[in-house]
Image: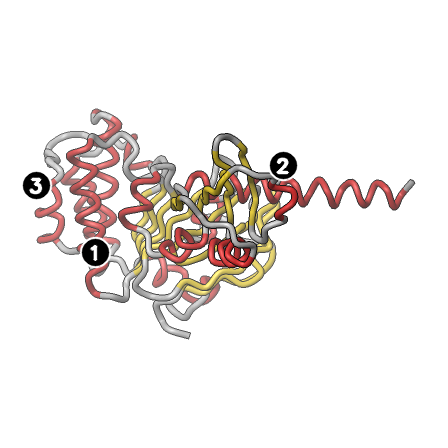
Amino acid sequence: MNAYEVVLQGVEKSFETFHFGPFDLNIEPGVCTAFVGPNGSGKTTLFEMLLNICRPDQGKITLFGSEYEQHDVDIKRRIGYVPDRSFIEESSSRIEELADFHNHWFPAWSKDKWNELSERFELNPKAKANSLSKGMKRRLAFCLAIAQQPDLLILDEPSSGFDPYIWRIMLDVIREFMNSGEKNVLIATHTIEEVRRLADYVAFLYGGKLLDYKEKDAMLDEWKALWIESMDPDRLKLPGVVECEQGALTRFVTRNAALTEEALQAAGIPVIKRQSLELDEILHHMIAEKKHKEQAAKSRKGAENT
């Protein structure tokens, strides 16, 4: 196991109305992984378990080759975290005081990096955190996390409240952070353009379950919309197809474009147009497919009990 891998094995966590897992994931070093899913899918629960804010009921989490039971403080000092909401945002302390606090607790803290980021993100060191706008509070939380010089950066909706100018600076800073080739970034976001620009891998979550985890470019190559001359789609029975729309042309959505096109070629049917799907559309189809399977399983179980 590489010391920079993020490893989850059989992780589960139960709440009164929500169950997370079982969850297995191995994230290699030096990549940005985007966690995409609707609200309530388990993204924040996952991040809080990675930070040992809440502990899994089952399974094991390994960070930097260690587990929290023996190395809690050492692990946390190597993680930069920007939560959806932070105590920092409501603090009455001045920005410079918060920087001094982080300097004390994080051994790798870089004053030079902090000064650089403060200037780039236009932070006034004398301003009190709780007097800042939402966007300025997010800038502060982001800059504090980066200046810690962490080995793992966890970002929960980091750009919420950012204007387009600051958003582009944030993207640049994250890319610079990853230049060493070993550090990992985990980001939960509803901003698909962030996923497109930053992510190497995408993890789709729904209902506390991992629907898929794959290299982003490979996923976009596999999921495609294909158009052919209009004909009866039921007659074709094409592999990989998850949706079909008929009009002047017949449009198929497939989760395996190569396999679907191979079947069309064998049937002598040319593909008129191809288009990669947007990531949010891929997630929509994955969720619909999961719900269909669950409903089918429930129906079978009901039939068996009658």
Q: Position of residue 149 (x, y in %)?
A: 21, 57
Q: Earlier in the sequence, mark 2 or mark 3?
A: 2
Residue 44 visible to an observer of this rendering: no
Query: Considering the image in quadrants, where does the N terminus appear?
Result: bottom left
7 versus 141 height, above or below: below
Is residue 191 left or right of 233 when viewed as pictured? left
Q: Amino acid at mark 2?
A: Thr
Q: Are marks 2 and 3 in contact (CB under 8 Å)?
A: no
Q: Position of residue 139 (x, y in %)?
A: 21, 37
Residue 224 visible to an observer of this rendering: yes
Is residue 83 left or right of 21 when viewed as pictured? left
Q: Depth-wise, is mark 1 or mark 2 nearer the camera? A: 1
- State the residue lying farthest toward the bottom: 1
Q: Position of residue 202 (x, y in %)?
A: 41, 52
> Badge 3 is on which residue?
119
- Residue drawn 48% across the image and 31% down it: 248
- Residue drawn 76% across the image and 42% down it: 298
Local secondary structure at mark 3: helix
Between 48 and 167, the one lying in front of the other is 167
Q: Amino acid at mark 1?
A: Phe
Between 23 and 140, the one lying in front of the other is 23
Q: Are marks 3 and 1 in contact (CB under 8 Å)?
A: no
Q: Position of residue 217 (x, y in %)?
A: 36, 55
Residue 17, numbered circle? 2
- State the residue lying farthest toward the right: 306
State the scheme by which the image is colored. Answer: secondary structure
- Residue drawn 39% across the image and 41% down it: 278
94 versus 3 height, above or below: above
Q: Amino acid at mark 3?
A: Glu
Q: CA distance from mark 3 to mark 1?
A: 17 Å
Residue 177, numbered circle? 1
